[in-house]
Amino acid sequence: MSATSYGWLILAFPLAGTLLIGFGWLRPGGLPARLPGWIASGAILGAFLSSIGALIKLEDRPEDARSLVDSAWTYASTGDFKVDLAILVDPLSVFMCLVVSGVSFLIHVYSVAYMGGDRGYTRYFAYLNYFVFSMLLLVLAANFVLLIVGWAFVGAASYLLISYWYRRETATSAGIKAFVINVIGDVGLVVAAFLVFDKTGALDYAGVFGQADSAFGHNDGTLVAACLLILVGAFAKSAQLPLHTWLPDAMEGPTPVSALIHAATMVTAGVYLIARMHPLFEQAPTAADVSAIIGTATLVFAATVALAVTDLKRTIAYSTISQIGYMVLGVSVFAYASGMFHLMTHAFFKALLFMGAGSVISAMGGIQDMDRMGGFRKAMPFTFAAFLCGALALAAFPFTSGFFSKDEILAFTLERGGWYVALAIAGYVGAALTAFYAFRMVFRVFWGPPVQEARELEQGHLAHHPPANPATGEAEDSDVGFPAEEHHIAEREWPMRAAMGPLAVLALLAGFAQVPGVTDAIEKFLEPTFADSHFHESAPSDSSEWVGLVIGGLISIGGIAAAYFAYVRRRGVTLQLRDRFGRVHAFLVNKWYFDELFEAVFVRPVATAGGFGRAVIETRFVQDFLVGGAVGIVRVGTGIARSIQTGYLRAYALLLLFGVALLALYFLLASS
Amino acid sequence: MDVVWFLVLSAFIFVIGAAGVLTRRNPLVVLLCLELMLNAGNLALVAFARMHGGHAGQVFALIVMVIAACEVVIGLGIIVAMYRNRLPIDVDEMSELRG
């Protein structure tokens, strides 16, 4: 089998899975318990094995022939121009497929147990497989059309999964918010594709990128506009400033969904997009600089918010926004391999952190507030170990995976010199904050005196709280459309441990795939895709990368030590700080007032304009003037017509006579 | 004889008939006046036919007579029906079609 056949298989497995589960549900009595979960996991495992097959086939080929396009059929064809349903199998797409399907598989396995008691179990796995299919379609697309299809599918899958508990009002409104912001990005991407097509006359990657240098001048206005529009799409999907507000709200979805979509895969699509479009961005460095600045701003902003938020899942969500900021910075300063490397390590440790958080939340009986947690170290040793691995990698503790990947991006940024140094310094500030908030979570959840739930768990009992919405405290039942009570199973079921174990190992060790001066597996593998990059030669030397690594390691240890001091040694010092700097704290807890800003800038003017339109334009103009006017004219006209209809025979005869006489007179006059 | 005399006579009869239709309230008289108008038309048709020496006008006049007979049958039928239903024999009372 060729590499492209494996590419088609990668798509076929999840699609078959979602159809099988979706239609299997129609069977009388539905599918047996847990079967949908295992079907879904098997489908994703199939996709993962196919990705490995594609990888092996690709490695067999010479380096300059590792970009394969295969077309299933032609969508549209006019003259010289045609759009194919085609997939592109090259190192970048295979790399993404491996990360997406690998992490997705583990999260599916985790979900089999975690969602075990939920009444919407079948629906959940049909959605989840549909999401993986969409994501792989996005990654494998060989032209803009298929990319946009995958892009929109992913947005739809995200909407379905965020509002999975559809009787929760907060969940449905979060889903709508995510979908609307994603559609803003879709529009940007579509318009960008149009601009590119207008100039190059092609929509397939090979055709567009082949002409990137000839069709556009350096920093050509149209190209910069197209790249900025691509960035709108990328930022909406990847939750970068100012389109990030949907991601923290998306935590309304089930925790494995947060792990899969809103940490490991979908939100990194924007990073993939920028890396994929690198021939365009290198020709339009202004757009790339904008992207780098926004990425840096986002990483610092989100890290500060993560310091103050007390909801466990939302803290991790802000951490995700911040980490994607690093990736965007990486691919925007043309450190593609480093950006993709960080994408991979982040997928491992962030999925792991979410799984650990899910385990803790289930032990807390659905409560997500860190203020009410503490002392889970003894009650849940496995979750504690896994969460610690994830937090170490997130904090970039020396020799964990995050250490190598994040600091490589910053070393690359430093190497660019000039004002990029400022971005790198901001990145190091963000790194210090990251280490601090990562261990803020660890110390607040696992250290300290055990809370009642933790003590009960040590005795072997699971905490039970009446089901309630963790965001608003509203009471709920556990029927379909709400979370099931039985899903509070902590870490007891083996599928959850089986999913967290490998990820913990990967979070610690994946960094050794690319150690400066020792190994460079990722960079070497991705090289054929980025061989045409103008910045290929400007990679920092091994020694300067090690300098960056040492700085990053020291910052990380410093951040962790500060967190230890603040949350373990001198508990309460943070409370004093909060009282002292109340306004700063309020500013951070309210997420820099972004939601309020959007409310004031977009929502309220539109609502006011809508109210004005309803009161004045609709009621006065349309209803009273247009409709009322037409009715009035007809009414007056019929009044006149009615007054002629007297019912008197003789009156009709008179009118008839006069009419005929007038006609006769007219013809007489006209003829003479 | 000049055709004008016939036409003048025809016009007189037509106007007498029209005035009768417009002024009288008894449906029987209205029908009679209608007959007058029709026959005024017949007179004009026959007069023109003689002037031109053709037969078309004569044939038209015969057809109009047949039509007039039919109309009178229907009209008298309606009047008999009104009488049987003890309705007033007055066209101004029959004004239920007023809009």
Image (cartoon, helix red, strand yellow):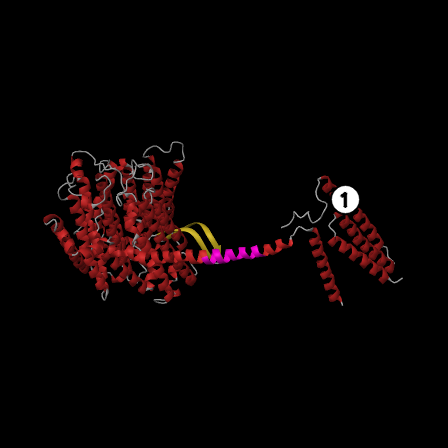
Please tell me whether the stretch drawn in magenta is mainly helix, strand or loop.
Answer: helix
Question: Quick check: A448 left or right of A466?
Answer: left
Residue A610, x across and y down, in percent: 39, 56
Question: What percent of the width, then of the height, locates residue A180?
Answer: 36, 52
Position of the C terminus of chain A, as image quadrant, is bottom right
Q: Secondary structure at mark 1?
A: helix
Q: Is residue A66 visible?
A: no
- Residue A335 found in image quarter: bottom left
Q: Is residue A75 visible?
A: yes
Asked whether A565 or B47 is in front, the reply is: B47
* Magenta-span inclusion, residue A374: no
The structure residue drawn at horizontal position 31% and vertical position 65%, both measured from the top left corner, is: A286
For the residue pair A354 and B16, the one nearer the viewer reads as B16
Q: In the image, is A554 to the left or to the right of A176?
A: left
Query: Where is residue A565 drawn, in percent x and y?
Result: 11, 51
Q: Amino acid at mark 1?
A: Leu
> What range of the chain is rendered magenta?
A620-636
Q: Is residue B1 above or below residue A351?
A: below
Q: How many numbered tags mark residues here?
A: 1
Instruction: Find the residue positioned furthest to the left.
Output: A569
In the picture of the structure, the residue carrying the numbered disc 1 is B76
